[in-house]
Amino acid sequence: EYMGRLLLMWWVFVAVFGVGLWFLSRRFKFVKWLRHALSGRSELERVCDALSKVGSIAENPLAVCDAIAAFDQSLAQSRPLEHEYSSLMSGSDSSDAIDSEGKASGTALHDMITCRIMSVKKFPSSSSLQRAVFTCVSSIGEVALIRNTIDALAGTHYDSDNPFHTAELDKLRNALHCASATQNSCTWEDFGFQGKDPATDFRGMGLLGLLNLLFFSTQLAETRDRTFLAEASSSAHYYPFAIAGINISALCVRLLRARLLDRTLLLLAATSAPPSAAPLAHVATTTTTTTAPHTHEPVDAHPRQAPPHRVCRRAETALHFFNRIYSTVFSRFHKVWIDEHGSVMQFNEYLRRLEVALQEELRSDKRGLPLLY
């Protein structure tokens, strides 16, 4: 009898322990279900209700970014809305969608996804809730569009037969000469490239590496900051400027793909004016889905191509935001290198340390990356 009780207690312990492990593994879904059962509202509805009460992102940026992040996470876990989330992550440029009459339908895709979410999750009819859902959907879509645009540029190989590519390379040479402290004729190797043909160094980051370097070098030239290149080229602090820049492009792309830059991009999109020029006319093209304006039903028309100038403007805005992040990260690398008297033998280690530090900062600081440019 005593042994029987011990055996029973053992099996009770095993059962309780197993249930506990299962609960811990499913705790998030269980908590979501419990909150839904007690409040009668889905997590998406609760997030949007809270968002509708905190004001705009300009008035309360941290609270709005928190709400959008929570909305994003909840939407990604919703099986009934899996298709809608996939469409959002594809970065479809809904602002360039064209209706059956050839007119821009503006926010057609985001409008349709907003309507679908409110229908599937049985949101009450409320204009404030609809605005909150649309704010989250459009913000997530904008960041996805930026991410996909940067990925496309990184995957675009430098082509010496492409006049746009060669023109940008010529601009880079001029900007580097202007930012250089010496007035003597400089070679590509003097600016930190590995050989006489810089195109070979852009293979890893494609056209993005060139455009990032061009933006940063232009900033140095326009501000007449000749100390940056001079320090990078000096015997005391030497590192290959161009190779460092291309490696930092790759570092920033990794942060972008890991979605650690989402909050920074949200704040940039809300507070920054778009760039005045759009030099990507020969790079960015897209095709969008046809939808009727201000409705949520597809129209019986063939997909049309968005106007090139609109596509280029959005690609340019995405690149401009990424360039500002890139320039800030490059400046951080340079400052640490100079302050710590780095050597070329430690080059990869400094890049690794910088990436780890940025990952920790971006995960813990809700204000995003403080930009210097």
Image (cartoon, rainbow, N blue to C red):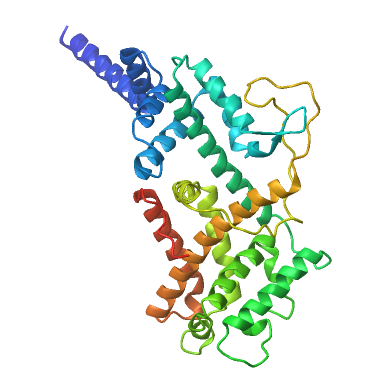
> With respect to residue 194, does 300 lie above or below?
above
Residue 307 is situated, as x and y percent measured from the top left of the image, at 75, 43
Q: Which residue is drawn at 61% across and 58% down?
A: 276
Q: Can residue 135 be seen in this view?
A: yes
Q: Is residue 190 left or right of residue 114?
A: right
Vertical relation: 288 (above or below) 311: above
Question: Residue furthest toward the left?
Answer: 2
Farthest right residue? 161
Q: In the rendered image, which quarter is residue 47 located in?
A: top left
Classify the position of the N terminus by image quarter: top left
Q: Which of 52 and 83 is in front in this view?
A: 52
Residue sitting at 55 percent across and 48 percent down? 257
- Measured from the top left, where is residue 66 in percent x and y? 38, 39
Q: Between residue 53 and residue 371, name the one nearer to us.
A: 53
Q: Can residue 193 be seen in this view?
A: no
Q: Is residue 286 above or below residue 294?
A: below
Residue 156, by quadrant, is bottom right
Give coordinates of residue 161: x percent, y percent. 84, 66
At a point 62% along the width and 25% down the height, the residue shown is: 294
In-front residue for pair 207/254: 207
Residue 182 lies left or right of residue 163; in this view the side is left
